[in-house]
């Protein structure tokens, strides 16, 4: 049985390589935790759930439920960046090489909600998106 790639690393690598996302945030796309000195705009990808779609010796297919947090300087900038990230993720199905190679077979979207980040002082505008990624080892 092959090992599934760490989906957060797969998505982070993809987003940092996507021209529209990298033009907007540079390399400020993170998995799980933000660095202490983070600046906006930035994106964070965190897996919070999911389940195997197919698990057999010949093929493994997993569905990862992700929370994608997007921060920008203003509400409008944050909403615009969230739209760029959504568009990029919609284009993700296919084979991806890099630090966590894998094949993405589907990306689906749940709600996108505005939720100011009150852990920051001053408060940062934020959009939280629920995204499911179905993938397998490369």
Image (cartoon, grey):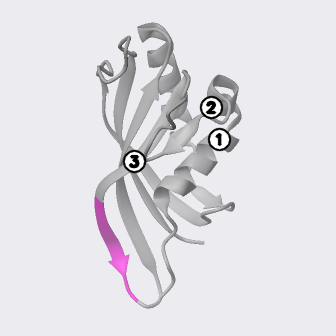
Residue position for label 3: 46
Residue position for label 2: 21
Q: CA distance from mark 3 to mark 1?
A: 15 Å
Upstream in sequence: badge 3 or badge 1: 1
Which span of residues is magenta-colored? 50-56
- Give the number of marks: 3
Callout 2: helix, strand or loop?
helix
| Relative to 113, residue 138 above or below | below
Residue at point 53% right, 50% down? Answer: 11
Front in this rendered view, residue 35 or 27: 35
Q: Nearer the viewer, mark 3 or mark 2?
A: 3
Front in this rendered view, residue 12 or 111: 12
Question: Residue 80: in sight, yes or no?
Answer: yes
- Look at the image and say whether residue 30 sits in the magenta stretch: no
Q: Quadrant of the C terminus?
A: bottom right
Q: In the image, 123: left or right of 136?
A: left
Give percent across and percent down for residue 19.
71, 34
Contact? badges 1 and 2 (CB < 8 Å): yes
Contact? badges 3 and 2 (CB < 8 Å): no
Q: In the image, 109: left or right of 80?
A: left
Residue position for label 1: 16
Callout 1: helix, strand or loop?
helix
Question: Residue 93: in sight, yes or no?
Answer: no
Q: CA distance from mark 1 to mark 2?
A: 7 Å
- Look at the image and say whether residue 53 sits in the magenta stretch: yes
Q: CA distance from mark 3 to mark 2?
A: 17 Å
Callout 3: helix, strand or loop?
strand
């Amino acid at each position: 049985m092959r090992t599934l790639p760490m989906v957060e690393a797969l998505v982070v690598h993809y987003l940092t390589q996507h021209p529209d996302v990298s033009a907007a945030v540079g390399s400020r796309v993170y998995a799980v935790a933000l660095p202490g000195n983070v600046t906006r705009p930035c994106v964070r990808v965190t897996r919070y759930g999911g389940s195997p779609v197919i698990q057999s010796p010949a093929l493994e297919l997993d569905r990862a439920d992700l929370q994608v947090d997007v921060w920008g300087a203003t509400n409008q900038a944050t909403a615009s960046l969230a739209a760029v990230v959504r568009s990029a993720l919609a284009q993700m199905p296919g084979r991806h090489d890099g630090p966590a190679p894998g094949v993405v077979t589907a990306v689906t979207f749940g709600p996108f909600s505005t939720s100011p980040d009150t852990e920051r002082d001053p408060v940062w505008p934020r959009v939280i998106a629920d995204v499911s990624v179905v993938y397998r080892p490369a």
